[in-house]
Amino acid sequence: MPRLPRAKAEEHVKAFERAGWKVVRVTGSHYILAKEGQDFHLTIPFHKGRDVKVGLLKGLIRDAGLTNEAYLDLFYRQKKR
């Protein structure tokens, strides 16, 4: 299985937006994403110059109901444009 990407929060937010999640607010240094029909939200920390940790990313992917392969497709599809 390919490795999950080491990237900044903005790039991961764009990938989750492709999966239907929307940024509903920014609280402090965290993006809060919600999806219609879901009764929970995803929180992605935004710390300037730092990558999102892999363990956190795995949890976000799981909570969003995605597989690692589906997430990689969303992530790299956005990078080609």
Image (cartoon, rainbow, N blue to C red):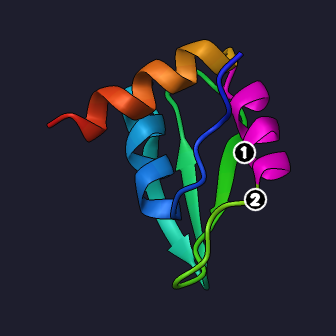
Quarter of the image for the N terminus: give it. top right
Residue type at the position of mark 1:
Leu
- Cα distance in 3D space between marks 1 and 2: 6 Å
The answer to whether residue 20 of the structure is visible from this angle is no
The residue that disc 1 covers is: 57
Residue at the (64%, 59%) spot, across then down: 44
Q: Against 8, is 29 above or below? A: below
Residue at the (77%, 49%) spot, across then down: 54
Left/right placement of residue 6 relative to residue 54 reads left
Could you tell me which secondary element the residue under label 1 belongs to? helix
Return the x and y of residue 29 as percentages of the image width and height.
60, 81
Tell me where the magenta segment starts and ends, as one range: 54-65
Whether the residues at callouts 1 and 2 have beta carbons within 8 Å, the answer is yes
Give 36 or 47, whichever is nearer the viewer.
47
Residue 17 magenta-highlighted: no
The residue that disc 2 covers is: 53
